[in-house]
């Protein structure tokens, strides 16, 4: 099936007023907030993952940095516990 676009359709879809109205309508729709995963990464799990990055290789440094950035809230506690375990 052929679809024809008219100039009026293009101006409506790029109209700032229409974009604003759509944005407000999307925000107004009630949605339940859910976790993105069923099981969150806790500090204990993160500490175990960080414990595998023990050598000074570039790969381990990279992996440790990715884990610390990706799971920043849990990383604070996990880094402290990993540092304590390493010093003992």
Image: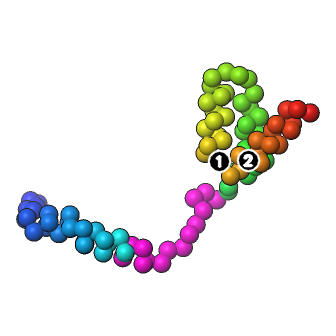
Whether 25 is drawn above or below 84: the answer is below
**Are there few (<14), some (14-19), or many (20+) residues within 10 Å of tag 1?**
some
**Quarter residue 24 falls in:** bottom left
As drawn, which residue projects farthest toward the top? 57
Q: Which residue is mark 2?
A: 76
Of the two numbered discs 1 and 2 in the rendering, the one whose residue sits closer to the viewer: 2
In the rendering, at what x and y percent does residue 69 appear?
Answer: 61, 43
Q: Is residue 78 left or right of residue 5?
A: right
Between residue 1 and residue 73, name the one nearer to us: 73
Please say whether residue 28 is one of the residues in the magenta stretch: yes
Q: Which residues are magenta?
A: 25-38
What residue do we see at 35% from left, 70% from top?
A: 23
Instruction: Residue at 60%, 62% (x, y): give it.
Output: 35
Give how far across and how far down residue 1 sits, in percent: 11, 60
Residue situated in front as seen by the camera: 15 or 2: 15
Question: Mark on residue 19?
Answer: none
Q: Residue at x 64, y 59 (%)?
A: 38
Q: Is residue 57 above or below residue 62?
A: above
- Expressed as whole percent of the image width and height from the top left, the position of residue 75 reads 71, 46
Residue bearing the label numbered 1: 71
Q: Residue furthest front?
A: 16
Residue 33 in the image, given as x and y percentages of width and height: 56, 69
């Amino acid at each position: 099936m052929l679809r024809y676009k008219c100039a009026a359709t293009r101006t409506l879809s790029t109209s700032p007023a229409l974009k604003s109205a759509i944005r407000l309508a999307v925000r107004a729709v009630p949605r339940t907030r859910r976790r993105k995963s069923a099981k969150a990464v806790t500090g204990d799990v993160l500490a175990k993952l960080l414990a595998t990055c023990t050598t000074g290789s570039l790969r381990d440094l990279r992996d440790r940095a990715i884990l610390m950035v990706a799971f920043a809230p849990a990383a604070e506690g996990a880094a402290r516990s990993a540092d304590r375990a390493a010093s003992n």
